[in-house]
Amino acid sequence: MRLFTSVAAAMLGAACVSAPKNVREQASSALACDASQVTVEQTKRRYLGDYAFEARGCGQKLTYECEQAYVLLIPVGTLACHKK
């Protein structure tokens, strides 16, 4: 049981990091702005479902929705992020 708990906690941590990183990379390209100048803020989080993020950089703003992957109702990563 401890192993499962540790693995689940690690996957949860990875899921939290992957979506903002994914959004930052996509927004950097879309905004023609260096990734170091792009800030990403989570604007909506649901227990189950999509997460919404706002990316700002080089005087512009984009909104993204990210689809989460789940195993036994535990978020384990980001499937994809799409510009709205």
Image (cartoon, rainbow, N blue to C red):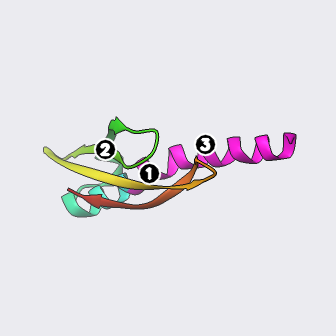
The residue lying at 22 percent from left, 62 percent from top is 30
Q: Could you tell me residue 68's position as x and y percent?
A: 46, 54
Q: CA distance from mark 1 to mark 3?
A: 11 Å
Helix, strand or loop status at disc 2 = strand
Labels 1 and 3: the sequence-earlier one = 3
Q: Which of the two labelled residues, at mark 2 and mark 3, occupies the earlier sequence position? A: 3
Q: Which residues are the magenta region?
A: 1-22
Percent of width and height locating residue 36: 36, 47
Determine crowd level at label 3: few under 14, some 14-19, many 20+ residues with C-alpha closer than 10 A: some
Local crowd at mark 1 within 10 Å, few (<14), some, or many (≥20)? many
What's the residue type where badge 2 is placed?
Answer: Phe
- Residue 78 percent coordinates (x, y): 48, 57
Q: Is residue 52 magenta?
A: no
Residue type beneath disc 3 = Gly
- The residue that label 2 is drawn on is 53
10 relative position to 16: left or right = right
* Residue of label 1: 19
Q: Quadrant of residue 70?
A: bottom right
Q: Is residue 32 above or below residue 42?
A: below
> Alpha carbon of mark 1 to alpha carbon of mark 2: how far?
9 Å
Q: Amino acid at mark 1?
A: Ala
Looking at this view, is 45 or 62 the one in front?
45
User: Mark 3 sits on what residue?
Assistant: 13
Task: Please identify the quadrant where the N terminus is shown.
Answer: top right
Residues tagged 1 and 2 counted as in contact (Cβ below 8 A): yes
In the rendered structure, the answer to whether residue 7 lies left or right of residue 30 reads right
Dot 1 falls on a residue whose secondary structure is helix
